[in-house]
Image: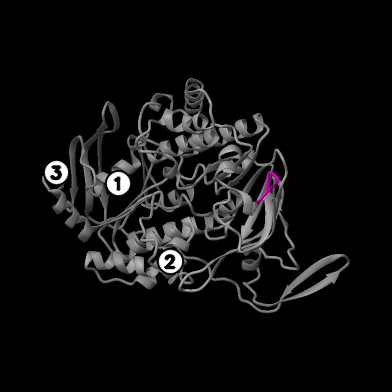
Amino acid sequence: MIEVRDAFRIFESAAGGTVALQGLNLTVEPGEIVVVLGPSGSGKTTLLRVLSGLERLSAGGGNVLGTQLRDIDDAFRARNLGLLDQHYARSLSADLACRQTVALQLELLGHDPRQAGRAADDLLEQVGLADRADDRPGSLSGGEQQRVAVCAAVAHRPGLLLADEPAGELDSDNAATVYRLLDELVRGSGATALIVSHDAHAASIADRLVYVRDGRVVAQARPGHDPAFAVTHGWVRLPDAVLAQTGHPSLVMVEAAGGRLVLEPIDGTPAAALTQTAAAAPGPVVAAVEAVEKRYGRRIVLDGLSRGFRAGALTAVVGRSGSGKTTLLHLLAGLERPSAGDVTLGGDSLGGLTRGQLAGLRRSHVALVTQEPGLVPYLTALENVELGLYLRGADGGPREALVQVGLEHHLNLPAARLSAGERQRVAIARALAARTQLLLVDEPTARLDEENARSTGALLARAAHEHGAAVVCATHDGVLIEQADETISLDGETVYSSQM
């Protein structure tokens, strides 16, 4: 179904070439569900775009369903491929209801509109959105939009599904539902799937796990088994955990002994233990919601919520998709107004302020990182952070902020050439550099691997503990939740962590 041979993809820019794929080899057999794992910027998304014909290889070759990669066009994609972009909003039209969006591909392929509508209703029911079939995307939460995009990608029962983080912004229950649906549709129709994910639920439906680093396949494994490391033209990448245990050596001796390869480090020192910043006593309330209600038509998202957010504390806001996490952040930022109740910032009510006054307040006191990074694509990572500070009239350390999020080697790369996870980290760096009183972050780790997710959580905790900001983070990621000082569930009671 898929064969890729010695694939290279190099993106040229004024700052020099960026290598996304370098000698990648991959084969996927008919009927397999293969899950691709790897850190942000490792080439996973580029691989999917190459397989769908949306990117052309700089060198190397391969085929999909017997068609050469260079010959894949719109007609081939429409007939044979199901594409699920990690930027799921791209597949949703603001002018179409959910049912129409899911049925669209079927109708374009010539199916009877009534049959297409029934198929769309069946899929929406399977992902718990039967009651939203007539709603448009603008009235749905991010997680609900993502589930509609999943349905739209599989409605025409494609022979090959290419999915990029299909459950990246979903809570655990809805992620399990989406992967169960993908499993049923792929196996029930005899199709094949290649899924990029960081989610443990994805591994539960996989026949094979493929690990990608530095634009190459570095290891493969069957679920529940240890990975086997790939040898590509004599090149093997050693696992970070193994290197850490031996002090991150830069040189090793290699010996063949009795049919075994033995590596012996000859330099390196044990890595220093990571220290977590300790939370001080919480400071004054920076922002608060008081008996807040938020309604969208007849739908109630928040119902009488009261809560204060204090300086020096990282608060994780959790709850199922559609429970109001993003809405709460938008209320605190003054981007939306409550249907009832009040929102305060620094003790002052936002209710009587004009849009211009709210914008000025945000510019001075609030940093918001949304689910879409909102970067200028032709500006470099450094220029995007500098622009954010300039618009605020603020001084800051843009380079330092980018180094903190692990992008010291990408300062001069245009945002368009960064991976989705790297763009998300630029947005976080831009917010951290502003040093505002209130930092609001919406699903910051949805597109990050566990290592970068843990690092991001530590940065947000440091912004609270060391710089005294009130940090409010909407998330369903356990890696980030465990670093929070306090957790607020919009599905039930407030839960306090042991750090407070």
Viewer-proximal residue among 245 and 38 = 38
Residue ID for mark 2: 414
Residue ID for mark 1: 329
* Label 2: few (<14), some (14–19) or many (≥20) C-alpha neighbours in 10 Å: many
Q: Where is residue 248 in the image (x, y as percent from the top left)?
A: 62, 72
Q: Where is residue 143 in the image (x, y as percent from the top left)?
A: 42, 39
Q: Where is residue 214 in the image (x, y as percent from the top left)?
A: 60, 64
Q: Main secondary structure of the magenta part?
A: strand
- Residue in view at x 43 percent, y 59 percent: 423
Q: Distance between the residues labelled 2 and 3?
A: 39 Å
Above or below 195: residue 295: above
Q: Are marks 1 and 3 in contact (CB under 8 Å)?
A: no
- Residue in view at x 42 percent, y 29 percent: 100
Q: Quadrant of residue 434?
A: bottom left
Q: Give, as a three-letter code, the residue at label 2.
A: Pro
Q: Is residue 238 left or right of residue 124?
A: right
Q: Give, as a three-letter code, the residue at label 3.
A: Gly
Query: In the image, which residues are magenta?
Result: 64-68
Q: What element carries label 1?
A: helix
Residue ID for mark 3: 351
- Residue in view at x 24 percent, y 68 percent: 394
What colour scheme has been applied to the protein in the rendered image?
A: one colour
Q: What element carries label 2?
A: loop
Q: Quadrant of residue 456?
A: bottom left
Q: In this view, does 184 lie to the left or right of 445?
A: right
Q: Nearer the viewer, mark 2 or mark 3?
A: 2
Q: Position of residue 224 (x, y in %)?
A: 69, 45
Q: Distance between the residues labelled 1 and 3?
A: 16 Å
Q: Are marks 2 and 3 in contact (CB under 8 Å)?
A: no
